[in-house]
Image: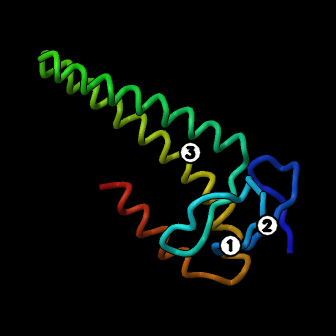
Amino acid sequence: MATKDTHSGNHDHDNRHVAGAAGAGDDHHAGHAGKHGRKSHHSDKLKADLTARLNRIEGQVRGIKGLIEKDTYCDDVLHQIAAVQSALNGVGKLLLSGHLKSCVVERIQEGDMDVVDELLKTMNTLMK
């Protein structure tokens, strides 16, 4: 059964979340199945936003490495580390929002209430 993409609202896709469920050549579903045997199915816009943010963060981390190598004052490096942590939290919030609006809602609609415990466990991990 196909469902509406809750991220972009403009195309349908298969709601199966198991590895190998996507059709051959279906780049929208390509990816790593993860430990639960499921794949995300976020919109291309969300994936592009997440990727851009992670690329910026990767550059920031390389910059911090350079600061360490140049013996930059510790307080300045610590401020850069805080900026990276904040940026990663932003990526996590964006991904969590997409997860709640698609994966979690779909699984609840399918009667899979285990997703609530999974989400609570993930939230506890994120809030450490």
Q: Amino acid at mark 2?
A: Gly
Quadrant of the drawing holding the N terminus? bottom right
Q: Earlier in the sequence, mark 2 or mark 3?
A: 2
Residue at the extreme front of the image, as rendered: 24
Q: Is residue 19 visible?
A: yes
Q: Label 3, on which residue?
A: 94
Q: Is residue 49 shown above or below 70?
A: below
Say whether residue 86 is left or right of residue 38.
left
Element carrying mark 3: helix
Residue found 59% across the figure and 81% down from its top: 113
Residue found 31% across the figure and 22% down from its top: 63
Graded by Cα atoms within 10 Å as few (under 14), some (14 to 19) or many (20 or more), the crowding at tag 2 reads few
Q: Position of residue 25 (x, y in %)?
A: 78, 58
Q: Amino acid at mark 3?
A: Leu
Residue found 67% across the figure and 76% down from its top: 108
Q: Is residue 34 shown above or below 64?
A: below
Quadrant of the drawing holding the C terminus? bottom left
Q: Label 1, on which residue?
A: 20
Q: Position of residue 35 (x, y in %)?
A: 48, 72
Q: Label 2, on which residue?
A: 23
